[in-house]
Each structure stands twice: as structure tokens, then as C-alpha cells.
Amino acid sequence: MVDYEKLKQDINRKLGIDLTAYKDQQMRRRINQWVERYELKSYNGLVDTLDKDLEHREKFTNYLTINTSNFFRDTKVFDVIEGKVLPEISQRNRPRIWSAGASIGAEIYSITILMNEARAASSLLLATDLDETALEKAKAGVYLPNQIVGTPPKYLDKYFTKTSKGNYIIDESIKKQVVFKQHDLLRDAYERNFDLILCRNVFIYFTSETQKRLITSFVQSLKPSGFFIVGSAEQIMDPASYGLQRVSYCIYKKTV
């Protein structure tokens, strides 16, 4: 398994995922683990399997795009979102909110619940991801117990229904407020004029050059005084160089 550069070209051509933007060490380790798990023996064996087995191809794409999420992830961040960010943007005229790299929708649904609790209206609650399978799961709104573990009991009782199998279905009144779209952060144009953008636990997998490019694009998509929220391992160095100021743990505000 020596020709990793060729594999990156093959994956880009077959799956449309540009691995040159990702950190080699982390991504290569993940792919090697996959090759060993399925006894594919080599990168060529992986590529051949992707060509012949559509189910394997779908599973590998899901694995590669790292779709992990749960409701109200990171209490410290959501406390500030609930206590400061949402009250401030709700004073504006129907704010626009974007959850980028939304995975299975837990984050955008968490935001939607808080907006409903505050009786705050929005003009757009957008959730995007590269992975269509993850977006379909988000639209279905069915979650395993470990995915709702951070949900305050008062919200769990009010906005979820427990199934006979022990899973949880989010209420239709929440689902219908969210717009889900496929979006490639590396290739597609970004919508503009957002009051709040969340892109959490996504940057960590990209190279520093790609991170800078994405942050710049996100800031351009924010309205003046809009908020940008990243993951706990993704603190922005020198936020002022992007026109941001740090508001709190993982939370930044556009200064221009």
C-alpha cells in the first residue's frame, strides 16, 4: 500500500472527494484501517471493490466523510448559543442560520428546538453535507439512544417520540422547518447573508491551507456581526486576520 497519491486521484475521480485537501496522516490511517478491516490487501483492491460493489462504495463514502454527531453536542457551546447568540440574532429580521457539515442533522435540529423554545422566527434554517446518505438520515429524523444522549429531558419529552425499538423520532413540526441540501465545502459556491454559521468538527481533517480558505469563505457568507462557531479542537488562530473576534469558547463574531 505505497501508492497513496494514485489512490487520492482514484477516489477523487470515482467519489468526487478531493483528499488533497485533507491531512494525509489522519486520512491515510483511516483508509488503511478500512483496507485491513475488509481484507482488501491493497489500495488497488479497494479501488476494484469500489467499482464492483455499490454497497461497499456507499459504506466507504460514509466512513470517509466522518459522519458522527449528537444532539446538543458540547454543553459549554450550546449554553452560549442559547444564552447569547440566538437572543442577539433573533432581534434581527428573521435570521438565516446554516449548519455546514450537518451530518445526520442533530445540530440543526438542536438549533431549531432552541429557536422554537424562544419563539423566534427564522427565514432559513439550512443544513448541508457532502454525504447524501447522511442527509437522508437527517430528513428521516430517526435517532439511536446514544445520538440524543445530550438532549435536556424537557426537550426530549416535548420534541421526540420513542419507538417500540427504542429509537427516537423528532417531531414533524421541527423537521419541516429545516432545508437540507447536498453541498461540497471544497467545490461549491457558498450562500451569503447568514446571521449564524456552524461548522464544527470538520476543519480538523483538512490541511491548514484548506482551513484558511474555508474560514475566509464562511466569513464572506456572514452578515456584519454574524456568528461563526467551530469545533472544540478547531480554535481559530489570529481571528482578527479573518475579520473575526473571539466571543467565547469556539464562538466568533464578524467584526466588519
Image (cartoon, grey):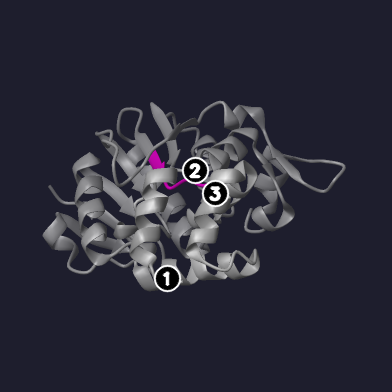
> Is residue 227 shown above or below 193?
below
Label 2 sits on residue: 131
Q: Residue 70, percent across and down?
A: 59, 54
- SS class, disc 1: helix
Residue depicted at x 31% and y 28% = 93
Foreground label between 3 and 2? 3
What secondary structure is marked by label 3?
A: helix
Q: Is residue 21 above or below residue 37?
A: above
Rounded to the nearest angstrom, the CA distance separating label 3 from label 2 is: 16 Å
Q: Quadrant of residue 176?
A: top right
Q: Which residue is mark 1?
A: 26
Q: In the rendered structure, which disc, 3 or 1, sits on the residue that comes first in sequence? A: 1
Q: Nearer the viewer, residue 191 or 176?
A: 191
- What segment is highlighted magenta in the picture? 98-104
80 and 230: which is toward the camera:
230
Left or right: residue 82 versus residue 157 is: left
Residue nearer the viewer, 16 or 68: 16
Residue 16 visible in the current orientation: no
Q: Secondary structure at mark 2?
A: loop
* Residue 99: percent from left, percent from top: 42, 43
| Residue 229 image point, x, y percent | 35, 54
Residue drawn at x 64%, y 68% is 37
According to the picture, the residue beneath numbered tag 3 turns out to be: 50
What residue lies at 53% left-to-right and 45% top-to-bottom?
51
Q: Residues within 10 Å of mark 2 (few under 14, many from 20)?
A: many
Front residue of 1 and 238: 1
